[in-house]
Amino acid sequence: MQDLKVGQTARVAGFVKGEGGGGRAYRQKLLSMGLTPGTEFLVTRVAPMGDPVEISVRGFSLSLRKDEAASLLVEVCGERQ
């Protein structure tokens, strides 16, 4: 997810398993925030140093830190014009 740029859309493909995934509790937190597999989101802002990144998902804005975002597996869908 760290390779996404402002204006790109992506889809949640799943979650990283093992140590890099942040654990079951963190996965549950992401799921409760609406980041379920198959959900599309738009990258709306990225901080100058790349942390945090703001996404628009299900009609609201959500900011994720690099380590939080790294636990998501995403598929790039395209770019908004």
Image (cartoon, grey):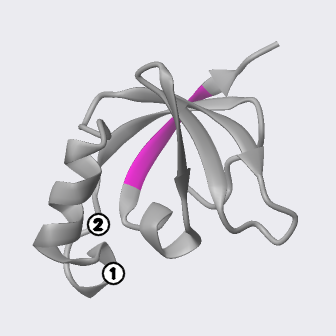
The spot of residue 59 in percent (x, y) is: 47, 19
In this rendering, position of residue 67 left or right of residue 42? left
The spot of residue 55 in percent (x, y) is: 58, 39
The picture quadrant where one finds residue 50 is bottom right
The spot of residue 46 in percent (x, y) is: 76, 53
The picture quadrant where one finds residue 40 is top left
In this rendering, position of residue 65 left or right of residue 75? right
Please name the predominant secondary structure of the magenta segment in the image. Answer: strand
- Disc 1 crowd, CA 10 A, few/some/many (<14, 14-19, 20+): few
The picture quadrant where one finds residue 68 is bottom left
Q: Quadrant of the N terminus?
A: bottom right
Which residue does the numbered mark 2 point to in the structure image? 16
* Magenta-highlighted residues: 73-77
Query: Going 82% across and 12% down the picture, which residue do you hit?
Result: 81
Query: Going 65% across and 24% down the picture, which residue do you hit?
Result: 78
Above or below: residue 57 compared with residue 55: above
Are discs 2 and 1 less than 8 Å apart at CB? yes
The spot of residue 42 in percent (x, y) is: 60, 29
Query: Farthest top residue?
Result: 81
Which residue does the numbered mark 1 point to in the structure image? 20
**CA distance for labels 2 and 1:** 6 Å
